[in-house]
Every structure is written in structure tokens, then in C-alpha cells.
Amino acid sequence: MKRLLFFLATLLLSQSLSARVVRVEVRSRADLFGGRSFGLAGAYEKISGTLHFAVSPKNSHDKAIVDLSLAPRNARGEVEFSADFFIVAPKDPARASGTVLLEVPNRGGKAILALMNRAKGSTDPATAEEIGDGFLMRRGATVAWVGWQWDVRDYPGRLRLEAPVAREGGKPIAGLVRADFVVDEKASSHPLGHVITGSIGGTGYPAAEKDSAQNVLTERDGPMVARRVIARSLWRFAREENGSAVPDDRSVWLDGGFQPGKIYEIVYVAHDPVVAGLGLAAIRDAASWFKNAPDALVRAGRVYGVGISQSGRLLRLFLSQGFNADEEGRQVFDGVFIHVAGAGVGSFNHRFAQPSRDAQPVSALFYPTDLFPFTSLPEKDPVNRTQGGVLDRARAEKVVPKIFATNTSYEYWSRAASLTSTSADGSTDAAIPDDVRIYFLAGLQHFSGPFPPTAAASRGLRATHPQNPNPVAWLWRALFVGMDAWVGDRVLPPESRYPRVSDETLVLPDALRFPAIPSLRPPARAHQALRMDLGPRWKDGIVSVEPPRLGAPFPSLVPQADPDGNDVGGVRIPEMEVPVATDTGWNLRDPATGFSGERVSFIGSHVPFPKTRADRERAGDPRLSIEERYGSRDRYLGLYAQAAMRLVRERLLLPEDLPDVLARGAAEWDEAMK
């Protein structure tokens, strides 16, 4: 009997540890919104705490984690680490749908409730406004977030990874780290960490050898312009405090101040690289735990990974580097939503990786963000003679999930999104596998702008024109239902919709037929993925050349424009089918911030049509006026409703959302005709 009990206990322990979550700390467990019931799913609760993991450097599924062999190990020869988690789940597991939606946090935050529940963003959803209309809860979905990023700022509610540093023979590892930045207003000092939309996106690495000759500060007048070295006597590692320089190994001070209209870049020596790739293992093993471990806080019949922007790029790397198989080779994600990631990956799994770094029009440039391969199926780089596909490893291990890849107009101009569906030389359309859908969301910007549209600075971004206000939430809701049907019921989703080389809806920027709209001109250039030489050890995840040597760019193509300046092709919301404005995926920087003519990060433009024919003729605007197009409010609303109904029939809009969509159309008419 004792031997039987010992066998059963050992079996349960091995099952518990098989997903590599070895311990769970629950810090908080409380009813969501006072125990309010969400239809058949009943009441929800929210659970937060820490997941503790262990991985083995000897396991073939962990070999991709850079510097794992140099991390400290426990008595079992495993590397331990931990991650914050936050879960919103039905209190009664029997009433859950079986779907776990695991959002990979963008810089430690939570976005999916704001996106799909039409809620106010919050790191700890509690109020009706922060929970929204309960779309996900009414469907019995469990929503989870797990920290994966080591350098998230220590702000309340942010989720982060706690990972060990790599050392060689017990001694610190030194390496070069690079930070670049621009300022919109003169400033005496600037953080070394990545600043994004006015706040710190990542803490970055502190300077370790402040007097090293390898520490170099440069300035340049544009992204591709030659650097000028700033004399070492003019700058130091310090921050501004009450007008004076205070020593600070995470900031840089420049005598005379940093000026708008220049790109500043500092390369400096840092120590103790964090084993950043453990963040991918945290996502992998948490998802596997939900699916396979009997002691999991919530159980899943299927798990969907969700990544938005930065975290969408992480999911592209996650799939490319083989993380959709856990340590036992089991499939982790059944479905994946990759939103507004373009063709990018990121600084997520190499020595001295800074996960918050991205690639914006004039900052955070030349990081390993846009790396070949770009397409799902294998492709060839005609310059470097390499070949491969994003899904090669998942295909080899038979763990390919269903994938929705969605990009807006912004990503075609600013994230090289065309490379996900073309050959590497941009000459032909690439084949798309049956388990992938690519949807171009025409006429949207990176995130939904405010409505009514405003020219006021938003999230620290100052632009020439009001932001593009077109909403994405209703498309997302339809895609969530479509993914559940695809994975659970094998109902095929709508076919991919994206601009193509073959029908000339996808073109080089100089072939764009953009109308001569007064005060609105396209950017001088689109973002290009660059071939970069990061040094001879890059194949092992070690950067030894900073800044990298740049090679030939991959061509970036953009959606063709119609006579109104709106994008053609793709998934077209009613605002694109029955427009009252030109809504682009690009906007130009406010000239006062420098770099006039360059794109501003993340946002598009909203330029209303003239109201009347007289207005059009007076302004010399080539676009037909609203009056000439529609004649009356009733006719406009009828056409708008027809466009919305087409989306319902195409399963890209839910019938339950139709009333709200039509109400939005009426509000847009009223705003345009003020």
C-alpha cells in the first residue's frame, strides 16, 4: 500500500512539474466587479501572484535560450526564474468555455480588455468602465497575462520577469549596449532606457564602466545620415535635477542640452546580461501549465496567444525559435493573434537584449527588430543566400497553431508589413499556408485614435494632422469568435485579405498615386527592414558590433491609394467604404519637434472631405465633397448600413455589434458636418 501511495504521489508530482511551473504564489484573489454575473458564465474572479519556473539547459527545447548555460543552477541542474501573473476567470470552472486567452503583456501592461471589451485601460480592472461590456466574460473565456520582460518599469500593476544574469566562471560578463533617442523639446539629460510615447518603456542597462574609451555619444541629422562624435568632455552619465547634473548610471547629460531635430546615440559598456530569453520560456510554460497540469489555477481546453505590437513581434520570434513546443514536445498555443507587428521580431533573446526597443521613424533604430525570414513558409534572401520561414520549426515538430496576423495601414508604412506576404525582393506575392490568415485592416492606425478626432498631442505624440479615429474593436471581436470556431469546430475563417503585388494594390512608395490634397502629402519614405551585421557571434545571440554595420535594405511596399487618398484592398470597415475623410496610416511630425516630413510614431492622419462643392472649389481640393457624394444624411446612413451588413455576412462583424457600429456611423456624419 505504501509503495502504491508513493507511486501515485510521484506520478502526481511529475505531472505537476511537467509544465515546468514548479511553484505558485497567489498574492490576491477577489471577485471581479463585486461578483457580478456575466450571463451563463456566472461570476468572475481575478487572481494575481507569481509563477516560479525551472528549465533544463540540457533539454533540446531550451537550447534556443541565449546564455542559459551560463545562468546559475539549482541542485537538480536547472535554471530557476519567475514571472508575475494576473488571471480573470469564471469562479465556477464548470461554467468556463475552456478557452484561455493569454495576452503577452506589452511592456508589462494589459490591453486586451480595452481592445475587445471596449473598456478603459487598466492594470487592475475593477470598475464597470475598466471591464467594459463584458464581451469576453459573457463567452466564458478566461483571460490571463504573464510577465516575460525583465526591464519593465516598477510601476503599479505592471507584470515583469525575474530572471538570473549570465556569468562566465562566476565573473561578470561585459558588453556594449546602445541607446538612441530624440527629444521634442530641449533637455539637459535623457534616460538610457527606451522612452516610448512620453514614458519609460524599459529600464535598460546601467553604465558599468563610466570612464571606458568604448563609451561614445554621437548625433546625426536623420536616420540614415552620418554620425558626428560629441567630445567626451561635453557629456557624462548623469541626470538633470534642479538645473544641475546629478550622477546617474542610467542617464546621460549633455552640456548645452539635447536639441530637437537630432538623433542622439550612445554606446557604452554594461555588465551582467540578463538571460532575457527566459521570457519566452515563461510564456510557453505558463500556457502549457494551463493545458496540462492538474494543479493549474485554471484549466484550458485550448489556449490562444495574443500579442499586440511589441508582444506581437515577440510571438513571431516565439514561433520562429521553436517555443510553441514545451519541454516534452507538446503543442502550446492552439491559436495565435499577432496584431500590428508588421514583419518584425525584436530584442527578446540575445545577450544584453533590451526588449522594449523597437523601430520607430526616427528613434530606436538599428536594433534586431526586422530580421529575415519574414514569411510563414520558407523564402530565400537573394543577397545573403539564406533561406527559411517563420514557421519552419513549428512545422517540423507538428505544433503549428492557427494564426491570425492583422496589420493596419501604419504597419505597411512603418513596420515593413508587406514583407510578410511578398518575396524578400518584393517582386512577387508569397504563398500563404492554410493555417495562416493575413488581414490588412485598411484605413486604421497602430492603435485606435480618439473620436471625435483631435489635433491635440496624444500619448506624447505631436503631429501635423488630427489622428485617424477609425475603430478596430469590432473587427477583433469577430476574429475572436472566428478563432474559436476555427480551432474548436474546424470552421474555416474568412480568406486572407491583403494588398498584393499581382494586382498592383501593393506598390513601391514612388508608385503611390496619392491625390494632391491641400496640406496633406505622403511621407518622404517608408520604413525599411535592413540587413545588419551585428558581428561574427550574432549566430550565437551575441552582439559585438555597435552600432551594427548596415547592408542593403529589403524593399517595403505600401497599399495603393484611391482617388480620395484612402487605401485600397484589405478588410474595409464602413468608414472606408462610405468615407467622410481621408484616413491614412501615416502622419507627419509637428515641425516644432524637428524632422519635418518624417512620420510620427504610431498614428495616422484624418483629413475631412469638404462639406460642400463650394468648399471644395474654394480650397482647390480634388476630393468630392460630402454633399456631392451623399446628398443627405439618410442616404449616407443607408450606404453605411449596407457596408456594415456586408461585413456581417463575411463574418468580419458580429450581428450583436451592428447597432453600435451604425450609431458610430451617425456620429461620424454629425461630426463631419458640424
Image: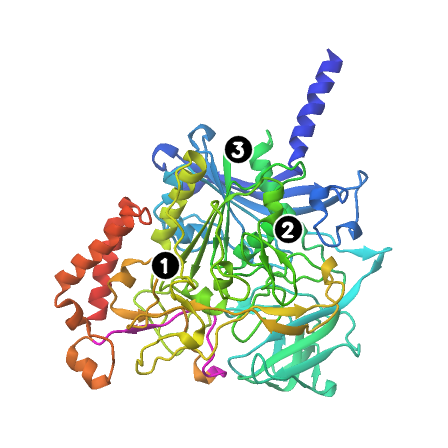
Q: Residue at x 74, y 87 (%)?
A: 233
Can see residue 576? yes
Which residue is nearer to you in this view: 339 or 522? 522
Q: Residue at x 55, y 61 (%)?
A: 344
In magenta, the rendered stretch is: 593-610
Q: Position of residue 312 (x, y in %)?
A: 52, 55
Helix, strand or loop for disc 3: loop
Give the label on residue 299, or none.
3
Indicate the quadrant containing the N terminus: top left, top right, bottom left or bottom right: top right
Left/right placement of residue 209 relative to residue 515 reads right
- Amino acid bearing label 2: Gln
Task: Please tell me in which quadrant of the rendered image residue 541 appears.
Answer: bottom right
Left/right placement of residue 291 relative to residue 582 reads right
Whether pointer 3 and pointer 1 mark residues with C-beta atoms closer than 8 Å, the reply is no
Q: Position of residue 305 (x, y in %)?
A: 52, 46
* For marks 3 and 2 on the same chain, the one whose residue lies earlier in the sequence: 3
Mark nearest the camera among 3 and 1 is: 1
Q: Position of residue 476 (x, y in %)?
A: 39, 51
Category of crowding for the residue at label 2, using alpha-carbon neighbours closer than 10 angstroms: few (below 14), some (14–19), many (at least 20): many
Per the image, the residue denoted by label 2 is 321
Per the image, the residue denoted by label 1 is 570
- Amino acid bearing label 1: Gly
- Amino acid bearing label 3: Arg
* For marks 2 and 1 on the same chain, the one whose residue lies earlier in the sequence: 2
Q: How is the image coloured?
A: rainbow
Which residue is nearer to you in this view: 450 or 98? 98
Left/right placement of residue 627 relative to residue 136 reads left
Per the model, the C-alpha gap separating discs 3 and 2 is: 26 Å
Q: Main secondary structure of the magenta part?
A: loop
Can see residue 106? no
Per the model, the C-alpha gap separating discs 2 and 1 is: 29 Å
Helix, strand or loop for disc 2: loop
